[in-house]
Image: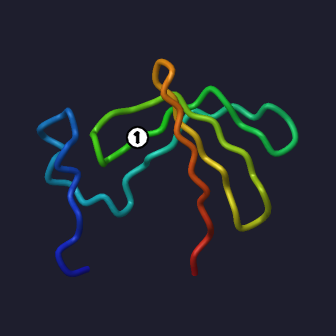
Amino acid sequence: MKNPRKDVKNDNERLRDRELVGTRVVWDLKHQGGKEWDDGEIYNPADGDTYASELVEIDANTLEVSGCVWFIYEEQTRMRIE
């Protein structure tokens, strides 16, 4: 990969030179039943912070992922790429 993006905003200075491709960004989600997971964490490389997270499977190729800190809530839809 030519000029891969690095994790330059990570709070941990030792990780700032790692490539973002392959970096784990969502973890510890607990299945709530059906197509919903909650009580996980999500890492945002844009600001180097980690937030509470939940996930909903819309279909086999689409996930709705959200993160929250205090009263600030952000939701994104992610689609499978080939």
Give the quadrant of the C terminus. bottom right
Residue 50 is left or right of residue 80, and the answer is left
- Residue at position x 53%, y 32% in the image: 73
- Three-letter amino acid code of the residue under disc 1: Tyr
Residue at (59% x, 60% y) in the render: 78
Look at the image and tell me in which quarter the N terminus lies: bottom left
Instruction: Report the front residue among 34 and 67.
Output: 67
Question: Percent position (x, y) of residue 46?
Answer: 30, 48
Q: Secondary structure at mark 1?
A: strand
Q: Name the quadrant containing residue 11.
A: top left
Residue 35 versus residue 80 in the image, above or below? above
Residue 3 vertical placement versus 11 (above, below): below
Q: Quadrant of residue 48?
A: top left
In percent of width and height, residue 76 lies at: 56, 51
Say which residue label 1 marks. 43
Q: Residue furthest right?
A: 34
Please report the residue visible at 51 percent of the width from the left and 21 percent of the height from the top. Answer: 71
Residue at 32% over, 34% down: 49
Task: Say whether residue 40 is left or right of residue 47.
Answer: right
Q: Residues within 10 Å of mark 1 (few under 14, many from 20)?
A: some
In this figure, what is the number of numbered marks?
1
Q: Position of residue 40 (x, y in %)?
A: 57, 31
Q: Horizontal placement of 9 versus 54: left or right?
A: left
